[in-house]
Image (tube, grey):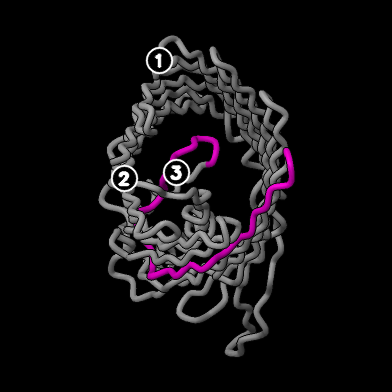
């Protein structure tokens, strides 16, 4: 019974964190070998009544981008993370991701292919699984909630075109998810569902104002456990709107993002006596709609040097069970040093306040992030 409960608990956690790595950056053309490294520390204090819980993570994603020709480049990325919930830990290297990108026809067509190399630990013990579940809380904004998964393959492409002050782009990508072991001492192979991403967007430039709109729609196939369908993620719609003003002495960026998920499908095996019946499918909206807003003021105080002031908010609505709503607000500042070639050093600190668990849990936290980009 204990082993069965452990398996069911792990599968439930995986159902919630399946899409942790689904988001990929927008590829920009690479002209020179580039090294990028980020170190982020984020810590929260959660208070529910008289109970207090400390949750934190330090992560250090690093990427190397190498142009092999004018139109072809490769990049490799990975990270080390250390997450803690009180005295429990989840730490180690993440999977390594490699990608090849081709920019064709005067940079109007982009093709890419990538692979997720299962370098990170996937078979977690009970303590590590519990930590993974807690840091998956979307209100906390942790960058990583697990270390590794299977051998994934990605393929995609896009088309962009400019017409006067307007630029338009569309694209699509498909991820073939690989199987992996989900827990120590459990002979169980888990395969997340493949996913299809469709994107579109446009820019309108009326100097010094730039308006930007992006839409991404994602569909998923069934997650499987030892070949049996167990869960299907609800389709995801993400809309982001931005307004950017850049002048010689300052820059202002205001953006908003809305994320909505359709109902997910949870499969359970029904039986009567010794006879198994057709699987039962429960449709439920597991994730509430999410809205986020960000504001950035960048003041250029000297050549290549700027100071910044930041604000952000995240609002998460209730799901079908009338649970898991949250609201978080953050503010902070930072310093950036930029070279004429594009290298930079960036340092940002933020303080957060908010609540989750439908207002029953108070949240206080802070983050410190340093970023360095070196173009050779």
Judging depth in this view, the residue of 229 and 255 nearest the camera is 255
Task: Tell me whether circle 1 and circle 2 mark residues in contact (CB < 8 Å).
Answer: no
Above or below, 261 against 61 in this view is below
Q: Quadrant of residue 335?
A: top left
Whichever of callouts 1 and 2 sits on the residue coming sooner in the sequence is 2
| Mark in front: 2 vs 3 | 2
Question: Furthest residue to the bottom?
Answer: 275
Above or below, 291 against 72 in this view is above
Residue 12 at what x, y percent from top left? 51, 59
How packed mark 3 is, by other alpha carbons closer than 10 Å (few <14, some 14-19, many 20 or more), is: some
Q: Which residues are magenta?
A: 138-165
Q: Is residue 11 visible?
A: yes
Judging depth in this view, the residue of 319 and 195 nearest the camera is 195
Alpha carbon of mark 3 to alpha carbon of mark 1: how far? 43 Å
Alpha carbon of mark 2 to alpha carbon of mark 3: how far? 25 Å
Judging depth in this view, the residue of 251 and 150 nearest the camera is 251
Say which mark, if any, is on residue 303: 1
The residue positioned 59% from the left and 72% from the top of the image is 222
Q: Quadrant of residue 282?
A: bottom right
- In the rendered image, which residue does mark 3 sit on? 134
Quadrant, the C terminus: top left
Name the secondary structure under disc 3: helix
Say which mark, if any, is on residue 62: 2
Above or below, 234 against 258 in this view is below
């Amino acid at each position: 019974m204990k082993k069965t409960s452990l398996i069911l608990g792990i599968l439930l956690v995986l159902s919630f964190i399946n899409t942790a790595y689904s988001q990929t950056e927008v590829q920009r053309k690479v002209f020179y070998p580039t090294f990028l490294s980020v170190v982020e520390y984020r810590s929260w204090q959660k208070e529910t009544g008289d109970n207090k819980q400390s949750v934190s993570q330090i992560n250090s994603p690093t990427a190397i981008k190498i142009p092999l020709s004018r139109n072809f480049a490769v990049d490799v990325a990975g990270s080390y993370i250390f997450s803690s919930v009180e005295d429990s830990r989840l730490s180690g290297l993440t999977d390594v991701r490699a990608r090849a990108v081709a920019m064709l026809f005067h940079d109007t067509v982009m093709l890419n292919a990538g692979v997720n190399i299962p370098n990170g630990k996937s078979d977690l013990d009970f303590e590590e699984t519990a930590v993974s579940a807690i840091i998956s809380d979307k209100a906390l904004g942790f960058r990583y909630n697990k270390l590794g998964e299977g051998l994934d393959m990605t393929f995609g492409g896009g088309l962009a075109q400019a017409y006067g002050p307007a630029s338009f782009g569309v694209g699509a990508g498909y991820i073939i998810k690989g199987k992996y072991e989900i827990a120590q001492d459990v002979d169980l192979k888990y395969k997340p569902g493949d996913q299809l991403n469709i994107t579109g967007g446009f820019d309108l430039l009326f100097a010094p104002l730039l308006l930007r709109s992006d839409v991404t729609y994602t569909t998923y196939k069934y997650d499987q456990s030892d070949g049996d369908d167990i869960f299907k993620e609800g389709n995801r719609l993400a809309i982001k709107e931005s307004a950017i003003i850049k002048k010689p002495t300052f820059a202002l960026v205001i953006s908003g993002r809305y994320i909505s998920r359709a109902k997910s499908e949870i499969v359970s095996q029904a039986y009567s006596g010794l006879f198994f019946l057709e699987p039962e499918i429960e449709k439920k909206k597991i994730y509430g709609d999410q809205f986020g807003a960000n504001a950035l003021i960048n003041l250029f105080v000297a050549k290549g040097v700027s100071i910044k002031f930041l604000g952000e908010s995240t609002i998460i609505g209730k799901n079908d069970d009338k649970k898991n709503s949250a609201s978080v607000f953050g503010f902070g500042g930072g310093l950036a040093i930029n070279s004429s070639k594009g290298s930079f050093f960036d340092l940002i600190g933020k303080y957060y306040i908010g609540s989750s668990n439908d207002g029953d849990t108070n949240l206080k936290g802070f983050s410190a992030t340093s970023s360095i980009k070196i173009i050779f």
